[in-house]
Image (spheres, rainbow, N blue to C red):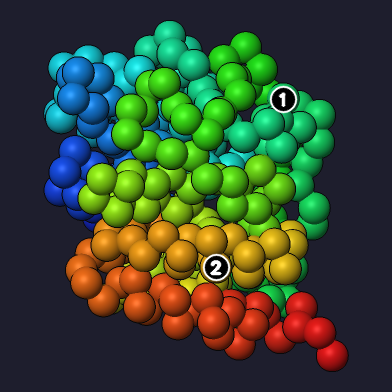
Amino acid sequence: MDRVPVPTDQIVPMDAIAPGVHGLRIAFVNVFSVEHNDGSWTLIDAAIPFSETQIRHWVERNYRTAPNCIVLTHGHFDHVSAARGLADHWMIPIYAHPLEFPYLTGKREYAAPNAGAGGGLMSLLSPIYPRGPIDLSERLRELKPTIAEMPGWEMLHTPGHTPGHISLFRAADKTLLVGDAFCTTKPESFFEVALAQPPELHGPPAYFTSDWNAARRSVEKLASLAPITVAPGHGRPLCGPGVAGELREMAMRFDQVGIPENRKAS
């Protein structure tokens, strides 16, 4: 049950990201709705603790029906905290990559964060962030590359930030939902993530990224798709003909712009 409100001035709707794709910003993280031709829709991610009420109100304002499922890009606390309450309320399944299951079924917590990643307050505070595990077993289902509930979308395994991190791609209009594979704000900086600075490309949140070689390969994979629209878990959506080139540049310079100094090879 929600007991601590999220300040309303930190809840920013992001309407019309792409056809049938809408977003809600809660504090420093985004959730998304994806609509389908048959009238159904899917919720992507489930935000931070105490955000269930805000998400439900957003849904009630915009939809007459519940989502057909919740798809999690990964299991970090800022993407899953409302998932169980929402899924139980709507009586729907939760999908995630099987490599995330240990963190979502009460078996394992994520590794300790890299508080020395630098960049700001978010990194310094990372040791106090919840690392799980949480138990979504009763609702959890395995996410497949082709998602029956999301026609026209493909699940892409994009590990690095976490072992089972995924992104979602709609080839018809080159719309890409990237979770935390990369960000359009500096995720280590409280000032940037809290105040929603103008978008710019950054690597995944450094304090929680577990495998930098895999993270680099995932960004390279996403860049190869040449997306037109990008919607990240942290930061503002990007849309336009320049997005693909900017993402390719970040992929090429990933070791310089993405990896924190204390994780670079000496």
Q: Is residue 117 left or right of residue 43?
A: right
Q: Amino acid at mark 2?
A: Glu
Q: Residue furthest right?
A: 266
Q: Residues within 10 Å of mark 1 (few under 14, many from 20)?
A: some
Query: Which SS class for mark 1?
Result: loop
In the depicted structure, whether residue 7 falls above or below residue 115:
above
**Which of the 4 quarters of the picture holds residue 100?**
top right
Image quadrant containing the C terminus: bottom right
Q: Position of residue 76 (x, y in %)?
A: 61, 45
| Closer mark to the observer between disc 1 and disc 2 | 2
State the residue position of label 1.
Answer: 105
Q: Residue at position x 67%, y 58% from top?
A: 160
Q: Position of residue 265 (x, y in %)?
A: 81, 84
**Which of the 4 quarters of the picture holds residue 5?**
top left
Q: Nearer the viewer, residue 112 or 4?
A: 112
Q: Residue at position x 80%, y 53% from top?
A: 111
Q: Amino acid at mark 1?
A: Thr
Q: Position of residue 189 (x, y in %)?
A: 50, 74
State the residue position of label 2.
Answer: 220
Q: CA distance from mark 1 to mark 2?
A: 30 Å
Q: Position of residue 237 (x, y in %)?
A: 29, 61
Query: Which SS class for mark 2?
Result: helix
Q: Nearer the viewer, residue 190 or 15?
A: 15
Q: Nearer the viewer, residue 186 or 265?
A: 265
Q: Is residue 134 left or right of residue 71?
A: right
